Image (tube, grey):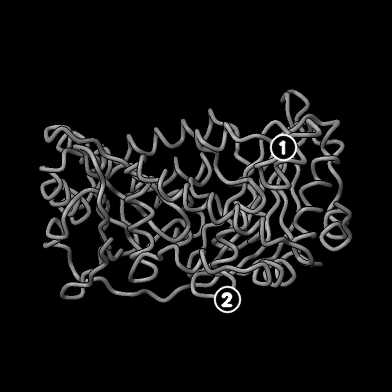
Amino acid sequence: MTALARAGARFATQPLRGPCAAVALVGNVGAAADPAREGGRAAAVARARAAKVRPRLAALGGAAFFDVDRDTTVLGAVCPKAKAAEAVSLLLDTVSKPIDDATMEAAKHEQVRELTTTAPDVRELVYGCAYLDTPHGRPVLGTAAEVAALEGATMTTENWAGAGVGCADDVFAALPPFEEKDVQEAVFTGSDMRIVNDGEPLARVCLAYAFPKIGEKGEDAATLLPFILGTQTPTPQTRREPLHALGKLQRDLAEQGIATACDAAYAPTKSHALFSIHWTCPDVRCEDAAYYVTANLARLAHRVSDAEIEAAQRAFAAARAAARARPAAAAAALGRAAAARGAPRGGAGVVAVAAADVRELLYAHVHDCDHALAARGPVHELPDYNWVRTASYDYAV
């Protein structure tokens, strides 16, 4: 893996076997920069740019992808390795030119359709609970009414970092200088939102806590936490693991037959960082699931074994290797790291995490701390806010 800053440009590359490469431009402006009452603008602009460059990339045998979060915008391409430099040139040309009205209108229409035909994801709704009434709490896609009312395709000026998986450094020779922007730090408020819908078969719940941002103490331990709990994104290997090989939370839920799915996420940025656990379960098991989730988190503030840490580090290493099988996602993650840090973070810090680091992290960020919770579906049996707060320090697992 290489990370370079040539003539002020910022980019990173890493090798990839096979005939394909993925390249991405990552702008350091995201949905949190959307003006008031213009939610979804960053996402609509990114969607329009992807639509604009898509036919030109197709002529190279490639395909476009885009992604927007609260702090960054990604525009990228998956293409044959021999065409990577041309793909980067097309991406740079696209982000440097204004978007015509017809393309923007089509992007808005597609985004409104997505908003009106897809049920809200609690993993997105929890941001509104965590950062109540702030730019970071607004939905990335905005609301259907906001997107429909957008005028023009202007956007706050971005600076672009580059990332390539399976390509050489020289494909970014034309990348312009990258300038740091002042970061508007998000203010964690914490709150609780429940959308009761008995027509849904399962309750969907997301519980989140404010965790260390990029560069803050505890970041490495927080990165390892999903693997300690056993709630990292499943891979073909982890799906075949016997119960005794799973993290304790995942093992508890599986043995009791409580939750149909459970996963955790930690994606720090310079402005904010949430650690969230998402699960689905029948309404009658809502309290049981909440108990095991909160009890396992509270336990780690006081007691975590070296064996748990070592197993989590092995799972972390396997997940890093498996991530290369998804070149578009790998390029986006690599570019976001280059934009935020100047260089991607290796795994050395996570490998060095000790049990004491995990206990300190959980005691500082979970033990008797405010939380955010979003839930929808049949959630009548889900405990209230005060129950969850008390459970963060009163446990027995």
* Residue 363, horizontal then vertical, whole percent: 75, 70
- Which residue in the structure is indicated by mark 1? 376
Tell me: residue 148, above or below residue 68.
above
- Which residue in the structure is indicated by mark 2? 217
Q: Nearer the viewer, mark 2 or mark 1?
A: 2
Asked whether disc 2 touches disc 1, contact meaning CB atoms under 8 Å apart, the reply is no
Tell me: residue 354, above or below residue 385.
below
* Residue 338, horizontal then vertical, whole percent: 33, 65
Q: Name the side, left or right, on which 64 lies relative to 147.
A: left
Q: CA distance from mark 2 to mark 1?
A: 34 Å
* Residue 293, horizontal then vertical, whole percent: 76, 48
Compare residues 161 and 310 and report the one nearer the observer.
310
Q: Badge 1 local density, few (<14 within 10 Å), some, or many (20+)? A: many
Kind of residue at badge 2: Lys
Q: Name the side, left or right, on which 26 lies relative to 392.
A: left
Kind of residue at badge 1: Arg
Label annotation for residue 228: none
At a point 66% along the width and 40% down the height, the residue shown is: 262
Compare residues 315 and 58 and report the one nearer the observer.
315
Instruction: Kindly state the secondary structure of the residue where label 1 is placed.
Output: strand
At a point 39% along the width and 47% down the height, the residue shown is: 67
